Image (cartoon, grey):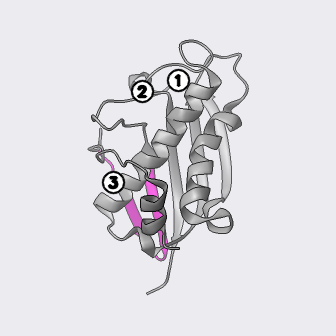
Amino acid sequence: MKPSEKIKELGLVIPPAPKPAGLYRPILVVDNFLYVSGQSPTLNDGTLFTGRVGDSLSLEQGKEAARQVALTMLSTITTHFGDINRIKRLVKTLGMVNCTPDFNSQPLVINGFSELMADVFGFEYGVGVRSAVGMMLPDQVAVEIEAMFELYKD
């Protein structure tokens, strides 16, 4: 099943694509790779999912924020690239979690993103290599994720 069909089948609600918050490209295509700049969890009303995991947010809330980043990234790809069905596979994910210094379950938070990508692209093509780290993030967003995808060759 094509990713666009899977998105519909899953009943996913895609938020509006955020505007760049600085001097960078939301996406960049080099050869047959699509790079997506760091995405924050944008809600359907355009606001951001904010908070700090281990303080104002639980692990489950952090995971939900990471899932929201996946939806935001799908929106950014569709808005700035076009046909999501041209994506062959997810290659690399860098997940950054806004968390307290003693929180050590960043990989479990980023699973919210990874699980949704596996749902949309299938396990074989929706799961790539990944890093998950904790840090302070701009505007107190709960999670930021950047990714790299392989495109089908024309």
Single out the residue that lies furthest toward the bottom. 154
Give the residue drawn at x 30%, y 43%.
Answer: 18
Over which residues does the magenta segment extend? 23-37
Q: Residues within 10 Å of mark 1 (few under 14, many from 20)?
A: some
Instruction: Name the residue that disc number 3 marks.
Output: 25
Instruction: Name the residue that disc number 1 marks.
Output: 136
Q: Is residue 30 visible?
A: no
x and y percentages locating residue 81 in the rendered image: 33, 65
- Check if residue 136 falls in the magenta segment: no
The local secondary structure at tag 1 comes to loop
Give the residue drawn at x 42%, y 28%.
Answer: 49
77 with respect to 92 (left or right) = left
Label 2, label 1: how many angstroms apart (C-alpha)? 7 Å
Q: Amino acid at mark 1?
A: Met
Instruction: Name the residue that disc number 2 marks.
Output: 138
Q: Quadrant of residue 23?
A: top left
93 with respect to 22 (left or right) = right
The local secondary structure at tag 2 comes to helix
- Check if residue 32 falls in the magenta segment: yes
Q: Quadrant of residue 91?
A: bottom right
Above or below for 154 versus 77: below
